[in-house]
Image (tube, rainbow, N blue to C red):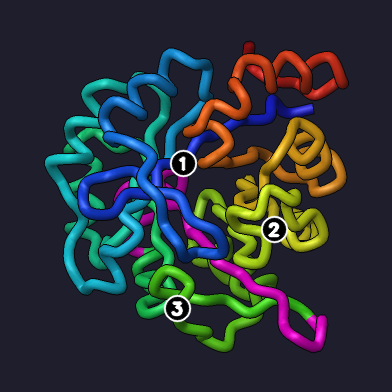
Amino acid sequence: MHTKRIIPCLDVTGGRVVKGVNFVNLIDAGDPVAVGAAYDVAGADELVFLDITASSDSRNIMVDMVRKVAETVFIPFTVGGGIRTVDDFKAILREGADKISINSSAINTPNLISDAADKFGSQCVVVAIDAKRRVDGSGWDVYKNGGRINVGLDAVEWAMEAEKRGAGEILLTSMDCDGTKAGYDVELTRIISENVSIPVIASGGAGNKDHFYDVLTEGKADAALAASLFHFKELEINDLKADLRRRGISVRL
């Protein structure tokens, strides 16, 4: 069994880490540099930094903030938000990011996936997918601009296309489960994991240790991402990993 990864996520807006429920009602969770440094020490396998309003505000990511976080963390560091061109990739990688996450820009310009993969390698191209279950239960639609716009793409088909175009990883967020602490969308995660051969990071809904276990086993995710649970110290990463290891999941302690 591959080693499974536990990844805290910093959703950043206005220079602060924030956390909401179903993508709204954001509350402050601290300074990104301090929070990132704490996770580096706390046993996180990777760190994800998302400038969550860069795309909807049509502005570029906060490069100086990325640099400061990169200087304090020594684990793989993924950055997303407001990245629209191969030059943007270059600028952020130069500031110390290991991987770049693209969401709205991948939808708007699918060639960006292949162009970036050709230039920097698939391993540093992460396609983030924000998916919401259709009202009729027939599947999941893809949303962009921080969950504001339904683009009418099927989430499973879009994940398969992203892989075909050169994505090295899928960061899959269930908008229905985001911030609810009621558990990941195991069904969505499993279906996408079974339809792509690249790693899938599950995001949205972590509330306890069982939720991580469920999405890493039944959901077939390669990694599980969480935010508020870790930010507000409701769960310590090393305690979580020790529990997963006891239950037979391979994790890095």
**Residue at 59% over, 53% down:** 179
Q: Where residue 197 sits: x, y (%)?
A: 69, 52
| Type of amino acid under label 3 | Arg
Q: Where residue 159 sits: x, y (%)?
A: 61, 66
Q: Is mark 2 on a helix, strand or loop?
A: loop
- Determine which quarter of the picture holds residue 185: bottom right
Span highlighted in magenta in the image: 115-138
Whether residue 131 is in magenta: the answer is yes
The residue indicated by pointer 2 is 196
The residue indicated by pointer 1 is 9
Q: Which of marks 3 and 2 is in front?
A: 3
Between residue 188 and residue 23, name the one nearer to us: 23
Q: Residue 148 carries which label?
A: 3
Q: Which of marks 2 and 1 is nearer the N terminus?
A: 1
**Residue at 26% over, 64% down:** 54
Please rate how many residues cluster around mark 3, counting C-alpha atoms within 10 Å: few if below 14, some from 14 to 19, many from 20: few
Distance from Cα at disc 1 to Cα at disc 3: 20 Å
